[in-house]
Amino acid sequence: MSRMRIDDVEIREADIFEILLDNFPDMIHSIDEKGRIIYTNRTAERLLGYARDELLTMNIRQIYAPEILKALEKGFTDLKKRGDKTVESLLQAKDGTKIPVEIRSFSIYDDSGHFLRTFSILRDIRPIKELQQSLIHAGRLAAIGELASGVAHDINNPLTVILLSNEMVIRDLGKASPPEATHIERAIGHSHDVQRASKSIQKLADHLRNFSRGMVEKTEPVDLAASLSDALFITNSKITKIGGSVFNTVEPGMFFTNGCPNHIEQVLVNLIGNACDAMDGLPTRELHIGIVPANRNGTDMWQCDIRDTGPGIPPEIREEIFQSFFTTKEKGKGTGLGLSISRAIVRDHKGDIELVTELGKGSTFSVFLPRLANPAA
Ligand code: ADP
């Protein structure tokens, strides 16, 4: 066993490695072919709340969240065959706390190629996830800020209806005392207009309040048609302002995914908003929206296409547009956060965003999200 000297103290190299590993900020574990934990560093104790001796009697399946066990089995089988892998996963601590981690794993084999064990380095990505949530929320507020003038316009129309109708009621009912039947009938009609206009303001206010909420949302079955109609509702004034026509073929009750409704809506609001900006001032301003089934890496997905008839995106910036703070819009109009946040949200839903674009013809942003069977069926 090799030794080295530190301040006149002779130390075995193996001890130094142990000290280093135990003080490594990331958890490290090694498992055998059955998934039994055969090594962990001390960081695992701090992260999971189990004593190391306890962990060394446990199986890997006991420290991961139950909901990802299926994915864990598949990942472990792949890893034994393939050698190395980096994935995001979810640990479960002794007290039940769920801890999102990024895992880098590699397998080692004997001379004849038989699998021996896997080493994994697990990084706690809670701070990154928290930052991502704040960024998503900031992006949402930026989107609302941008939509604000249009929303004011959306409120102004029904407000005008309310004021005018109310004036008519006052006039009708003030004409004769007691008022005649025709006046009362007309006043009732106007009151209905007031009611309808008030409801549309209420709907918009409710919608804005929900959309701007910053809480970390739970996942639930989401009807993509509903997300689309909500996104179209909130971007209505922007579409109207550029004189855009919407062709939406998505039927409700058919396309479900598991996710955060607000986050999915945020992605669609961004994509629709970008399409409007791109088409502003062009002779043809069409927004085509559709959903088709697709398959990505063996997973059944919905492919939600948002296609515009804008100028298209030049090849040299097709990757850059997904970077944070990249914008070609004038100051005050773009934050450059829309697409980077949208991609992060969609990837968080185990999906992705792809772009097909042709200069002079338009762009299609396709949002891929895992298919979920109709929850009501
Ligand atoms: P922002 O909209 O604030 O600029 P995004 O991240 O949403 O930020 O978009 C980045 C850039 O991508 C835009 O500035 C624009 O150049 C380009 N882009 C996005 N969507 C489209 C589109 N549908 N057509 C043309 N260009 C687009």
Image (cartoon, helix red, strand yellow):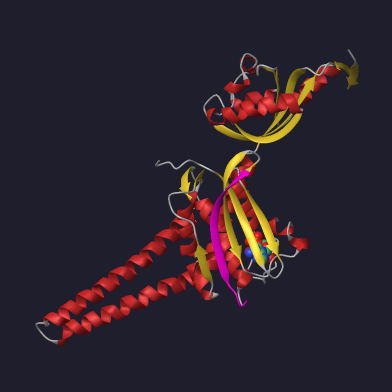
Q: Position of residue 7 (x, y in %)?
A: 88, 22
Ligand 1 image-quadrant field:
bottom right
Residue 197 seen: yes
Specify the quadrant that holds the C terminus.
top left
Query: Is residue 356 placed above or below 95 in the rendered structure?
Result: below
Left or right: residue 325 compared with residue 151: right
For the point 78% across and 17% down, the residue is 114
Q: Position of residue 372 (x, y in %)?
A: 50, 41
Specify the quadrant that holds the N terminus.
top right
Left or right: residue 336 compared with residue 15: left
Determine the image quadrant of residue 177.
bottom left
Q: Nearer the viewer, residue 223 or 264?
A: 223
Q: Position of residue 212 (x, y in %)?
A: 49, 57
Query: Is residue 239 placed above or below 298 in the rendered structure?
Result: below
Query: Is residue 199 placed above or below 129 in the rendered structure?
Result: below
For the point 76% across and 19% down, the residue is 115
Total marks shown come to: 0
Please tell me whether residue 111 belongs to the stretch shown in magenta. Answer: no
For the point 27% across and 78% down, the residue is 166
Single out the residue that lies furthest toward the bottom. Answer: 175
Determine the image quadrant of residue 110.
top right
Q: Nearer the viewer, residue 110 or 137?
A: 110
Residue 142 seen: no
Left or right: residue 82 compared with residue 59: right
- Which secondary structure class fits the magenta region best? strand
Find the magenta span and give its range. 282-295
Q: Position of residue 90 (x, y in %)?
A: 59, 33
